[in-house]
Amino acid sequence: MRGRSTPCAGALAALAAIWLLTGCGGHAGPTKADFVAKASAICRSVEQQLKDVGSVPVEGGFEAKLEEGAKALAQSVAELRKIPLPPHEAVPREWLRFREQAAAAAKRVSDAAPSSGQRRAASEEEFKAKQSGSNVARSYGLTDCLNT
């Protein structure tokens, strides 16, 4: 029987070839380090945008700055959502949920009338969502994402 191939041996050889071509089963998707690096870059960018909005005179004054800040936060959430999430890790999903809540609340702040109860409530919601998001970010190593 030596030198003769059996159907089972052929199947095993094919599986071994596929296993080798796919990287020996090693990399199964994005890693925590991949996610943290990409998210940190976005956080640094939005932090700079918010600083720029706060420091540069904007036509329309404070209300226009609130609107620009809310837009920057919403855009950062959209960019963060494009980053592939590490499989089997709940923390990035939880953190993104808080980011979305903060961005939605920031939009409500900018849409509400100055000194209104709606603005105060939305501002409080934004603050709480950012605090919760910062706590989650800290626990995951997203240190560049604590202030935005």
Image (cartoon, rainbow, N blue to C red):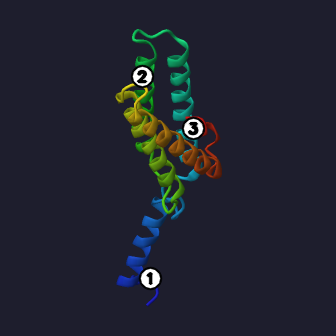
- Cα distance between the residues tagged 1 and 3: 57 Å
Residue drawn at x 36%, y 26% is 113
Amino acid under disc 1:
Gly
The circle drawn on residue 3 is: 1
Asked if the residue at tag 3 contacts the one at tag 2, i.e. Cβ–Cβ closer than 8 Å, the answer is no
In the rendering, at what x and y percent does residue 79 appear?
42, 37
Helix or strand or loop: what does disc 2 sit on?
A: helix
Q: CA distance from mark 1 to mark 2?
A: 74 Å
Query: In the rendering, which numbered label is found on residue 68?
Result: 2
Location of mark 3 (residue): 40
Residue at 58% from the left image edge and 39% from the top image edge: 145
Q: Please identify the quadrant where the C terminus is shown.
A: top right
Q: CA distance from mark 2 to mark 3?
A: 21 Å
Residue 114 lies in what quarter of the image?
top left
Q: Is residue 52 above or below residue 147?
A: above
Q: Residues within 10 Å of mark 3 (few under 14, many from 20)?
A: some
In the rendered image, is residue 140 in sight? yes
Tag on residue 32?
Answer: none
Earlier in the chain: of badge 1 and badge 3, it is 1
Q: Position of residue 45 (x, y in %)?
A: 53, 28
